[in-house]
Image (cartoon, rainbow, N blue to C red):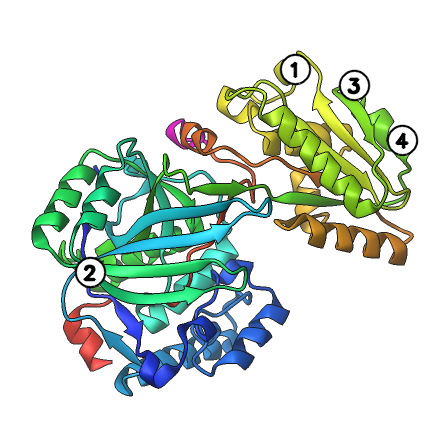
Amino acid sequence: MAFIAPLRGVRFDTDKAGRLDDIVTPPYDVIREQSAEAFLAKNPYSMVRLDITKAPGSGAVDRERYVAAANLFNTWRREGILIRDEEDALYLYETRYTLHSGKKMVRRGLLCLVGLAEFSEGVVKPHEHTFDTVVADRLQLLQHCKAQFSQIFSLYSDPDNAVIALLEGARSEPAGSVTDADGCVHSIRRVTDPTVIRQVQLFFRDQSLYIADGHHRYTTALGYRRYLREQQGELPVTHPANHIMMYLCPMEDPGLSVLPTHRLLYWPGGLDVAELTRRLQPGFELEEIHAGSRESLIEEALSRMDEIEQRTQEKTSTSFGVYHPGEDRCFVMTMKAGVNDRFEIAAPCLKDLDVVVLSELIVKKYFGLDHQRCESEDLIHFYSDPDEALDAAVKDSAEHDDITPLLFLMNPTRVEQVRKVADANHVMPHKSTYFYPKIMTGLLFLPACRQRDDQAS
């Protein structure tokens, strides 16, 4: 099944580049334009300058951006800003963080190379669709820079925590530590013991890997390998393009957190609460929340939803919160018995997902907005932070008379649901999962060309 291997990672020399905290960034796809500017202001070696954000396309102006990133990457390597480890290693990656509830968590995983496999092989399993424009952007960057700047976040099953226990018990050396904007502390340590590395490799021979975060980057790596094969013919097994850098985390790890991604739906026109509830009542029991301020309404709705979600370990009820900012009213919605069996999704593993119920039953059937219209008119915005979503809903409600913002509060998708969907070869709607904390971009790089080509650049 999965082939994993150690790597000689490329890292920043902090004596020359400065504090890692001011250099690393979250993955490119969660960085907003204002955040990118703030990252650039911290340090001239910010990863934003390499891992280009949010401008897919193939025009001449865009190509200049990829060329500039490649030139910068090569310059930093020549000047010793970036250095390469001398020994092959697996990297133990520990993240210490605090949830919004105040609960302190520790998540542990490893950074390594993984043999690139087509999705049809069943070795690496996706759970989300990808968008061609995003893949085209990432492919241009990879073709020009010939390096992977970030890791694919993937899951594997290890109920006994055997792999992490092996790595934690081995002799290791620190290889970098940063504190991100949320206060999460990310630390990596090099493990070079060949006996330990071999034991870890043997463990993964019987494992499938489940992509948690990084579907576009993985699809890009597949495209890059196809591109090289067209140029050079079949590649040697050891060619870097036959491998990809991953962060692997056991799905049973108690520190693994999946946060919900809330939906802000922009109804194209006026819609009062009476009409909203009329549309929802065929499928849901509605309980209005009375809790004072709008912030308290959202907090209480999320608390009620969590209570419903925690009643059983199996998925037996689906609940949402919905907030109408124009009238400052909030409801908790719980699906009525039998409704799940009546809407047009055949696969049980998909019908069990709140994100599918929202997309197919509420948005498509009850509101009459199909996927194509939602995408073409940008009718749905996604937020991991409910406070940020609330601010946007209130602001847009006050400023626009021709739309009605409706904030739908979500429960998180469960890890076991991700596994069931991937094993059944299905995919979830866009932004179904938000694994937290994100893996930091810039802690470790991987050259994606052979060593002699790497030296020539």
Q: Which quarter of the picture shows residue 135?
A: bottom left
User: Quarter-wise, where is residue 123 in the image?
Assistant: top left
The residue at the point 8 percent across, 53 percent down is 194
Left or right of 341 in this view: 85 = left
Q: Mark 4 points at which residue?
A: 275
On the image, numbered disc 2 is attached to which residue? 7
User: Residues in magenta?
Assistant: 421-426
Q: Are marks 1 and 3 in contact (CB under 8 Å)?
A: no
Residue closer to the observer: 290 or 132: 290
Residue 424 colored in magenta in the image: yes
Q: Position of residue 312 (x, y in %)?
A: 54, 19
Residue under the image location 26 percent in, 32 percent down: 160
The reply to whether residue 267 is in sight is no
Question: In x, y percent, where is residue 435?
Answer: 48, 46
Which amino acid type is marked by label 3? Pro
Q: Is mark 1 on a helix, strand or loop?
A: loop
Q: Are marks 2 and 3 in contact (CB under 8 Å)?
A: no
- Is residue 261 in the magenta section? no
According to the image, label 1 marks what residue? 342
User: Distance from label 4 to label 2 (Cα)?
Assistant: 58 Å
Crowd class of label 3 (few under 14; some 14 to 19; many from 20; radius 10 Å): few
Judged by depth in the image, the label closer to the viewer, 4 or 2, is 2
Label of residue 282 in the image: 3
Depth-wise, is mark 1 or mark 4 nearer the camera?
A: 4
Q: How far apart are marks 1 and 3 (CA)?
A: 12 Å
Q: Residue at horizontal 43%, vertical 69%? A: 24
Q: Which amino acid does label 1 sit on?
A: Arg
- The CA distance from mark 4 to mark 3 is 12 Å
Secondary structure beneath label 3: loop
**Closer mark to the observer between disc 2 and disc 3:** 2
Q: Which residue sits at x=40%, y=68%?
A: 141
